[in-house]
Image (cartoon, helix red, strand yellow):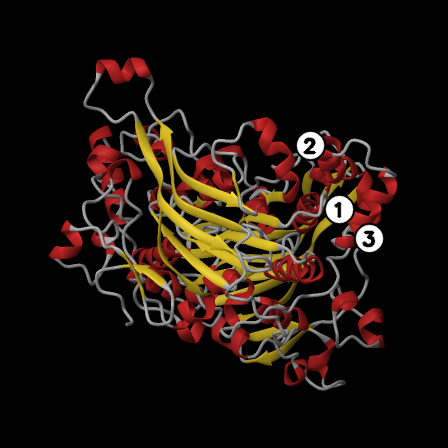
Amino acid sequence: MMDAPRPDHQLGDNLVEIRDLSVTFETGRGPVRALRNVNLDVPRGRILGIVGESGSGKSTVIWAMLRLLAENGAVTGGRIDFNGRDLLQLDADALRAFRGAQAGVVFQDPMTSQIPVKSYLQQFLDIAYRQKASRAEKIAHAIAMMRRVGIPDPEQRIAQFPHQFSGGMRQRTGIAMALLMHPDLVIADEPTTALDVTMEAQVIHLLRELQREFQTTMMIVSHNLGLVAELCDEIVVMYAGEVVERGDIQSVFANPSHPYTRALIDCDPARVLERTRILPTIPGELPNLRHPPRACVFVDRCPHAFARCREEKPRLNKADEGHVAACHLLDGVRPVMHAAAPAPAQDEVVPAIAGDVAPLVAVRNLAVSFQVRGPVAALLNPGLKTSIDILVDVSLDLKPGETLGLVGESGSGKTTLGRAMLGLVKAQAGSVTFKGRELIGLGEGELRPLRQNMAMMFQDPIGSLSPRQTVKSLILEPFDVHRPASGNRDALAVRLADMVNLPRDLLARYPHQLSGGQARRVGVARALALEPDLIIADEPTAGLDVSVQGDVLNLMRRLQTEHGLTYLIISHNLPVVRHISDRLAIMYLGRIIEMGDATAIFARPAHPYTRALVDGIPRPDPTQRRRLVSIEGEVPSIARRPQGCEFNARCPHATDLCRAEMPAQQTLGDGRMVRCHYPLID
């Protein structure tokens, strides 16, 4: 028989106690002291969130716990007690018993953490190999866990492979795997980073429900403050390998007592509900951990630093009951920091875009299909579809100097639309004109000179850059393609680096030597090299910390003002889109279902799907936790489109008309377009 969920734990004791943990990585440039004397407790039966920017050491803590550090990493001091046993002293057999049976892990990217050539059935059986149960009992338990996490038809789907599941379903299955053995501890490393806002909300609620049901202790590692505020009971804030603040989630968010914690909260775009073109940021960068500061690690970026901060390491001072922060300001020597917290940046004055200006780009009735079966398969199976429709009857305008935000869940066709506009994806029907010239049907030789005036920023800032080229070579590559005789290359590279605030000494580096924010600036420099009129930016802030997001968005806004750029911003990050866009276009299953002024749409969405997206944004405020998810279910397969309104199966307002008839496009009183039989506003 399978183990039953354990009864409620006594919440007063700690399941995990970490004392003076230090981790060092050996590199070609010298040892990097990634963690230094880290102390934290994980209370039994609670959810602990660990937050901080990339490089703060939060993931290193959990990999040290699991003894999964990279080969060049080593624990150089301290202990990690789990139920009274030091994990750092376990032998190989005890360590295997700990992983999976006593501690389960939900990884950041389920597509790379789940084995692509094994069915889920085999992967569940591999996890349960230590259980004293029959194969049939193990399979029944795995199916029950899949059903519990919301996988439909688990009896059939357990035989499928990871590539046959959507991203949200893969992550749900990863959670089922982590909980399969009813472990005492579940560790989740950025569990919602790759998910849309709707899937993120569903996973947050699922984790919260499962933690209550199984009385499991959880550690959530994330740079998403909204997720931590929604899910966690306690929080640890890390910076540059040290714990700078920890305490009850309500107390820390209500009274952030370390300048770094305050800055992180201020930088979150989801916190600022009113539109602002210029977002708050944290100036500077993390210190070099080959030579960490001997006093306060945040001193070079702190607006409240004084002489003592550079001379003496602060101790953890009490801010409230059960809430401490490593800051000299709490000693009473200086006024408390949060009383003089900086106000959010104010919006700048933006010239209005004239309504009668001819569009720079006009898309009309664009349709894109992808071939899924070859001609031989079509002959052998004449009833099967040989292609699927990715974009259906898409129309939009982009006027000079404006920013259009294109949002929707994964699979909605956003990226395909951007690529089709540039001629990178072949359209089967419709029209795309750029400065009045038709692009559909042009050959590569005709498109190439036009592409000097159109550029794309790709989603993965490092993966889209050749690993064999230096930064200088990468940002000058557009000149090599379009303008070989382009003058002094060194001067051009320096000018482009300065334009995007990229330090000149990075020009000699390779992509793997850059941070995510630096790699994104290289992408911006490449896109701007030939001074185009149009830039299509695909997820320009994906995977970036909130402070770096603000840097990139402020940079893009400044360059737009200086150079008159026109942006199409493709994103599922609605807080980002709110602040940077003039207009919004909402996509669902390859159709634009609502489009209009961004501020008006966020204030009063007209389509139920838009309303669900807006309501699904997690707030970085634990007092505003949602009790219900804004939308259930996943995006239907584009190979089997629902009849009638394609949103009807997920819409709380659907009627028989919605299930039978596709809604026509209509224009509302405020000028926005919507495809809905029953718009939420007139």
Which quadrant holds residue 465? top right
Check the image and report above or below for 146 versus 297.
Answer: above
Compared across the picture, whether 441 is left or right of 59 comes to: left
> Rounded to the nearest whole Å, what is the CA distance between mark 1 and mark 3?
8 Å
Of the numbered discs in the image, which one, if any, rests on residue 467? 2
- Dot 1: element: strand
For marks 2 and 3 on the same chain, the one whose residue lies earlier in the sequence: 3
Q: Amino acid at mark 1?
A: Val
Where is residue 466 shown, x and y percent of the image? Answer: 67, 32
Which residue is rendered at x = 53% and y = 49% of the image?
539
Do we see residue 233 in this rendering? Answer: no
Q: How many marks?
A: 3
Do we see residue 588 in this rendering? Answer: yes
Which residue is rendered at x = 39% and y = 64% of the image?
614
Of the numbered discs in the image, which one, if any, rests on residue 291? 3
Compared across the picture, whether 63 is left or right of 636 comes to: right
**Closer to us: mark 1 or mark 2?**
2
Relative depth, front residue between 464 and 530: 530
Q: Residues within 10 Å of mark 3 (few under 14, many from 20)?
A: few
Residue of label 1: 32
Where is residue 89 shown, x and y percent of the image? Answer: 58, 43
Q: Residues within 10 Å of mark 2 (few under 14, many from 20)?
A: some
Which residue is rendered at x = 29% and y = 40% of the image?
637
Q: Amino acid at mark 3?
A: His
Q: Are marks 1 and 3 in contact (CB under 8 Å)?
A: no
> Rounded to the nearest whole Å, what is the CA distance between mark 1 and mark 2?
23 Å
Relative depth, front residue between 164 and 523: 523
Compared across the picture, whether 489 is left or right of 209 comes to: right
